[in-house]
Image (cartoon, rainbow, N blue to C red):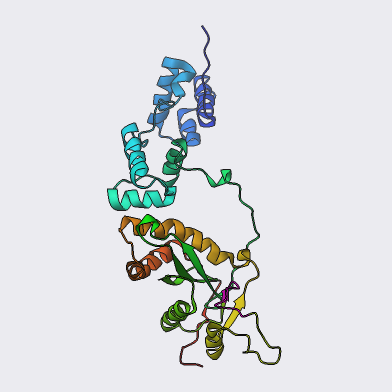
């Protein structure tokens, strides 16, 4: 009765040397050196070969479940928690919450595989999205700061729809300020920008869309300030440029940040039971610090381009 043996390249090499020993074409000492084994280990391989033939050199661990593999009970417990509390969480954020709140530790890729197999998560490869060529990052921190207002149900069904004013550095991808407001309006942008400037100083430029807060359609060619909005005039007095993008894709850094915030920030506030703008604004600095620790990058040039607020 014939049967097939599956051997790895390493096992085939061992078989070749063991057969040479038995054919007296190689000594045990020479084989031990080539296999990087002790002589006693080579003698055990010889005994296994004499007893079982080539099959004796095949690893006994093959086809057995790994000792590191999680049990079905563990896998099901993790997935049940995700279904109950984190159904719309991605694998990375779900893993963070399993560790942080439930003391359940599992590798990110393992959890991603479990969630995909369970139909909870759809991989990005399967999501068809239009791809835009990203604009290269600026070199220095504070050289260009993208600002945008994101209207969203930030409190889900626990509170009203509102706007989140987002300030993100182009060179590092770090959030520099967040402010929740009832709407995207001049007063709240001025309030948020004042807080930003007091914390960081004056960037070289802000990069925004063509919202009415930033851009007026009535401008004079003779007077540079005639077409400025109240917000734009304030920046002009501070010697801060305001650049208005032509398309949402042009300010992709802040657009992508908004998508991440609508995922992570919404869920963090849900877990904390937050339902008011005041609570959200009080929590914002804690969220910013965690976000930047996870996603912030080092700038290509370490120079900080922010200028002291008094210099104007």
As drawn, is 258 to the left or to the right of 273?
Answer: right
Q: Nearer the viewer, residue 65 or 212?
A: 212
Q: Nearer the viewer, residue 117 or 136?
A: 117
Q: Identify the magenta region.
A: 207-216
Residue at image point 58% right, 80% down: 242
The stretch drawn in magenta includes residue 209: yes
* Picture coordinates of residue 194, whole percent (x, y): 44, 82
* Picture coordinates of residue 210, whole percent (x, y): 60, 73
As drawn, is 81 to the left or to the right of 59?
Answer: left
Is residue 246 something that shows in the picture? yes
User: Furthest-right residue in view?
Assistant: 221
In the rendered view, tell whether residue 134 sits above or below residue 116: below
* Picture coordinates of residue 10, whole percent (x, y): 51, 31
Residue at image point 37% right, 52% down: 96
* Picture coordinates of residue 61, whole percent (x, y): 40, 28
Q: Main secondary structure of the magenta part?
A: loop
Q: Picture quarter containing residue 248?
A: bottom right
In the rendered view, tell whether residue 8 sits above or below residue 160: above
As drawn, is 245 to the left or to the right of 188?
Answer: right
């Amino acid at each position: 009765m014939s049967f097939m043996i599956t051997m790895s390249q390493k096992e085939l090499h061992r078989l070749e040397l063991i057969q040479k020993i038995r054919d007296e074409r190689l000594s045990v000492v020479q084989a031990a050196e080539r296999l990087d084994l002790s002589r006693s280990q080579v003698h055990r391989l010889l005994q296994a070969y004499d007893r079982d033939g080539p099959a004796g050199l095949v690893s006994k661990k093959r086809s057995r479940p790994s000792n590191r593999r999680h049990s079905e009970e563990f896998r099901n417990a993790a997935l049940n928690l995700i279904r109950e509390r984190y159904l719309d969480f991605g694998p990375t954020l779900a893993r963070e919450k399993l560790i942080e709140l439930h003391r359940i530790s599992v590798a990110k890729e393992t959890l991603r595989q479990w969630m995909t197999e369970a139909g909870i998560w759809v991989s990005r490869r399967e999501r068809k999205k239009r791809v835009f060529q990203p604009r290269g990052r600026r070199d220095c921190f504070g050289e260009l700061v993208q600002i945008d207002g994101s209207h969203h149900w930030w409190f889900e069904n626990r509170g009203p729809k509102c706007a989140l004013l987002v300030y993100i550095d182009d060179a590092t991808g770090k959030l520099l300020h967040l402010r929740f407001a009832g709407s995207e309006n001049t007063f709240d942008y001025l309030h948020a920008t004042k807080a930003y400037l007091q914390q960081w100083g004056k960037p070289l430029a802000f990069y925004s869309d063509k919202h009415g807060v930033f851009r007026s359609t009535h401008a004079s060619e003779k007077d540079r300030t005639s077409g400025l909005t109240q917000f734009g005039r304030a920046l002009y007095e501070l010697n801060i440029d305001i650049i208005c993008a032509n398309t949402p894709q042009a300010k992709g850094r802040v657009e992508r940040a908004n998508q991440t915030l609508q995922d992570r920030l919404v869920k963090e506030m849900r877990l904390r039971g937050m339902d008011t703008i005041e609570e959200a604004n009080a929590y914002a600095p804690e969220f910013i610090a965690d976000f930047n620790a996870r996603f912030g990058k080092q700038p290509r040039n370490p120079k900080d381009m922010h200028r002291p607020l008094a210099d104007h």
